[in-house]
Image (tube, rainbow, N blue to C red):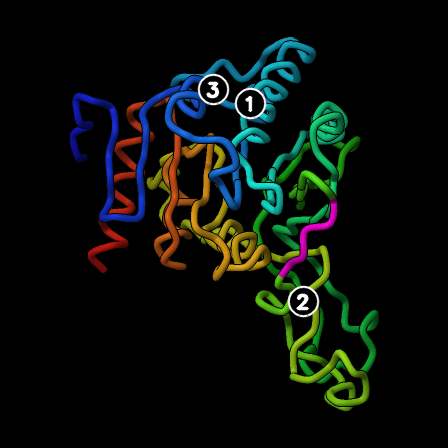
Amino acid sequence: MPDIPSERVYKVGEKITLYLEDCLSGIRKYLKQEEVDVVVTSPPYNIGIRYNSHYDNMPREQYLEWLEKVSVEIKRVLKNDGSFFLNIGGKPSDPWIPFDVAQKLRKHFVLQNVIHWVKSIAIEKSSVGKYPGISGDVAVGHYKPIRGKRFLHDNHEYIFHFTKTGRVELDRLAIGVPYQDKSNIGRWKSAKQDKRCRGNTWFIPYETIWDREKQRPHPSTFPVALPEMCIKLHGVERTKLVLDPFMGIGTTAIACLKLDVNAVGFEIDEEYMKKAIERLQSFKNF
């Protein structure tokens, strides 16, 4: 793995800047007021996941107060027409976590959209009628099986889209989907092309790991498609800087490389930082 520079700052080309530093102190130190266009991040969920450098089992109120402090800094550096996409989930025995977090941030942001990240879905042919693209029962995606008889498999998480005003215009067709009924094209004034708003349910499966000996380098990360879709939805052309306060292994930064936008990320764990640098260098040199 690559070495971390002694100054704890690493740049990948001219677009990506990573800091091996706590996001609270780092945002205060390095980012100016209203400098950031888009924030895409996924903080620890406080459900006891084994991270290298974070205790993921705080008392609930302490956890919420900590995230609130981070959100206050995010609000300071976010532009007035910026978007803050917060991916968060809970666990079957404690499903309130996402709602508690959203409620805590309510005093600082407007919850403009609630997006459901669907990791796995089952569709029965009998439920969809004569859709030409579905010829039989379909079950796609991945989930972690849950034992016992009390809880259902947990196949989705939330992406809360926070803004300062609730009036931020989005590029909805940038992540649009084709019409099933092509006769809609031209029938409505808004239907000028074969693409419609995707809506607030996003099916984004994880990449399959076939090798049982291969371990995930980070216990809780999202697919690159998730931050990529968030940035596209906000509008790539008007996105000059993206922030990920909980960078992990650099997934948001990879999405920014794909979209050719600037990104800054913070991470407290040196091993995750090394992996992020490795992934970014591999992508950049691909």
Mark nearest the camera among 1 and 2 is 1
The kind of residue on which mark 3 rests is Leu
The image quarter in which residue 27 lies: top left
Q: Which residue is at a point 23% across and 60% down the rendered structure image? A: 286
Q: Which residue is at a point 40% across and 51% down the rendered structure image? A: 256
Vertical position of residue 244 compared to residue 112: above or below: above
Q: Which residue is at a point 36% across and 47% down the rendered structure image? A: 211
Characterize the local packing of mark 3: few (<14), some (14-19) or many (20 or more) Cα atoms within 10 angstroms. Answer: some
Residue bearing the label numbered 1? 70
Q: Is residue 176 visible?
A: yes
Q: Earlier in the sequence, mark 1 or mark 2?
A: 1
Residue bearing the label numbered 3? 24
Contact? badges 1 and 3 (CB < 8 Å): yes
Residue 230, percent from left and from top: 56, 52
The residues tagged by marks 1 and 3 sit, at their Cα atoms, a distance apart of: 6 Å
Callout 3: SS: helix
Q: Is residue 105 magenta?
A: no
Residue bearing the label numbered 2? 138
The residues tagged by marks 3 and 2 sit, at their Cα atoms, a distance apart of: 44 Å
Callout 1: SS: helix
Q: Which residue is at a point 75% across and 25% down the rendered structure image? A: 107
- Magenta segment, principal secondary structure? loop
